[in-house]
Image (cartoon, rainbow, N blue to C red):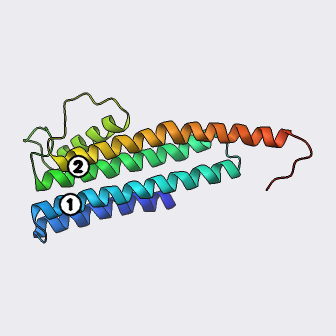
Amino acid sequence: MRNALEYLIIILLSAATLNVIDHGWLSPKGMQVLIVALCWMKTVFFVVEEMIQLRDATRMNLAYHRFMWLMLVNMFQIILSFGLDYYCLLQINGQSFSVNNELYGSELIFECVYFSTLNFTFFGYGDITPQTVPAKLMAMTEISLAFLTVIFLLSDFISMKESLRIRESQPGETRA
């Protein structure tokens, strides 16, 4: 239930951002700053949430496949979040990314989520590239978050589970 709510919040934040763009309440530069700031705030949220899930999964001795499922859901949230952020950035400045200028609506959203997926999975074919400073900042943020998620969190879970097993197998020790 919580994950569904988080997906809804990601979509609603993007819809609210698009509403601000449509009404012209901020200058294009102000909107770009807002989108990058929202991107960074969501990144902090994702890092904190993943650390909490890592801690809780280790304490509960959660099975590895269940932890992987949780991480997969989080990864899809991150990909969707950045994809929608890229889309919002393109609505302000169509030159933010080297993307087909004839795409609109759902096709352009798909293209942005595609780019986000390539960033997150470290494939980066190069068919879409960030062209402006805000776009590059957001792409760097996503790649850094992906590295943190994949490399540190998944390996930390394995090492923490292993240390838990070692502690449990040593007789006579009490847990703190």
Direction from residue 169 to residue 106 in the image, left or right: left
Residue drawn 12% across and 47% down?
Answer: 104
Residue 86 image position (x, y, % from top left): 23, 49
Residue 46 image position (x, y, % from top left): 44, 54
**What whole-number distance in Å separates the C-alpha atoms at marks 2 and 1?**
13 Å
Residue 97 appears in view: yes
Going by the numbered disc 1, the residue's amino acid type is Val
Please determine whether, in this image, residue 127 is positioned above or below residue 80.
Answer: above
Direction from residue 26 to residue 74 in the image, left or right: right
Residue drawn 54% across and 47% down?
Answer: 70
Mark 1 nearby-residue class (10 Å; few <14, some 14–19, many ≥20): some
Please determine whether, in this image, residue 10 is positioned above or below residue 117.
Answer: below
Q: Which residue is mark 1?
A: 33
Which of label 2 and label 1 is nearer to you? 1
- Return the residue nearer the eye: 94 or 32: 32
SS assignment at label 2: helix
Residue drawn 25% across and 67% down?
Answer: 16
SS assignment at label 1: helix
Going by the numbered disc 2, the residue's amino acid type is Tyr
- Return the residue nearer the eye: 122 or 163: 163
Instruction: Say the numbered circle drawn on residue 86.
Output: 2
Residue 142 image position (x, y, % from top left): 34, 44
Direction from residue 136 to residue 151 in the image, left or right: right
Determine the residue located farthest toward the left in the rendered image: 102
The picture quadrant where one finds residue 115 is top left
Mark 2 and mark 1 lie on one chain; the one further toward the N terminus is 1
Residue drawn 59% across and 44% down?
Answer: 67
